[in-house]
Image: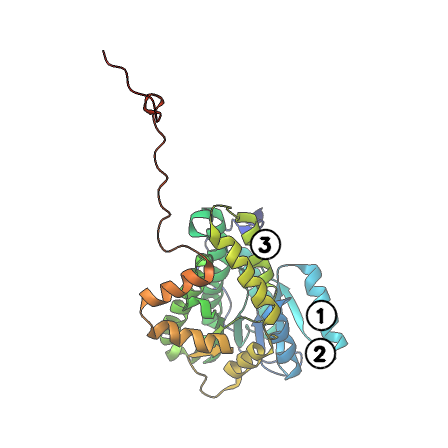
Amino acid sequence: MGCVEAYGSRHCESGREGRGALAAGAWSGSGSGGRSVLVTGATGGFGRVIVFRLAGSGWDVIAGARDTDKARNLVADAAERGLALRTVRLDVACEASCRQALRECAEMTGGGPWALVNNAGIPQAGAVADVDDEQARRLLEVNLLGPARLCRLVLPAMAARGGGRIVNISSGLGRVPWPMGAWYSAGKHALSALTHCLRVEAAHLGVRVSLVEPGAFATPMLSRALTDLDDLRDPANPGYESTTRLFTAVDRRVPGPEPVARTVQACLTARRPRPRYVVGRDARFLIPLHTLLPLTLTDRIKHTVTGLPRIPAPAAPPKPEPDETPGRVKGTA
């Protein structure tokens, strides 16, 4: 069993093993002396500020990273800040990698992490008609199936301890579906639904599950989405040009990601964490607005912002047949 290169990154070929592969050992905090937490996608974006904030607050942080060089750089940067954290190689899109990473976490912590923060995610901008099956499958594997798999794998040990925390980081776009980014919205919407169900299912195990829905913050996500738009650009679709201008303008004005890190910390430390946290002014404004307004009106707003036309362009008049050229009279038998 192993992983092979596919979709531009690693894809798993592992066979399906039995559920709850981790041994349900007793928890014991180690490392920095605090409870242990596994954070996925830890080398950039939200993940980087999350692990630094938690490590600085005394948590035993295990940073999941797909790239080993980036993991080493993360540890070095943490050391420069006077912080200690550990890493595991973790590709959330690969089942074998997830299982191996959690086995290593179990060895590090004496049974498995007390908390899991599912942060890893990728964008996929572009019109629905232009995103192919492989691109869509890759997004769903990273943004939905990977987090679901990790939740499934950590639950047995959490249940054996009598408690734990799971934080799934979705997006405001999961509740405000945005044209030219439909697959990203679809994956985050699905992750939100899964989180709400898991919260109810895991309550009797003593596991608290929270959903974090950030708006736009300064992370590499927007620049990667701009790359997607360039790769898929269709000159006949005006949405590409307008969306590129929109994303570029947003990328220049968004705040830093620290509010998201503070929110994750609140999810882990609150005696009774809230089911859902909306983070960012744009998300707090747009989510209720999109919920309250009729779809006909929100559609008009999206047409205006994206530059996508609401009605078909007038059909071009048919070209005259050769014997119907103006000024020429058809011959008769």
The label shown at residue 75 is 1
Q: Depth-wise, is mark 1 or mark 3 nearer the camera?
A: 3
- What amino acid does circle 1 point to? Val
Q: Residues within 10 Å of mark 3 (few under 14, many from 20)?
A: some
Q: Quadrant of residue 219?
A: bottom right
Q: Indicate left or right for 16 with 11 as reference.
A: left
Sequence order check, earlier mark of 2 and 3: 2
Q: Amino acid at mark 3?
A: Thr
For image coordinates 57% across by 81% down, the residue present is 262
193 lies above or below 265: above
Residue depicted at 67% across the width and 71% down the height: 86
Q: Nearer the viewer, residue 115 or 300?
A: 300
Residue bearing mark 2:
83
Residue count near mark 1 (Cα–Cα under 10 Å), binned few <14, some 14–19, many ≥20: some
Vertical position of residue 253 compared to residue 8: above or below: below
Give how far apart the Cα atoms at labels 1 and 2 are: 9 Å
Mark closer to the observer (2, 3)? 3
Q: Position of residue 288 (x, y in %)?
A: 39, 76
Say left or right for 190 vs 45: left
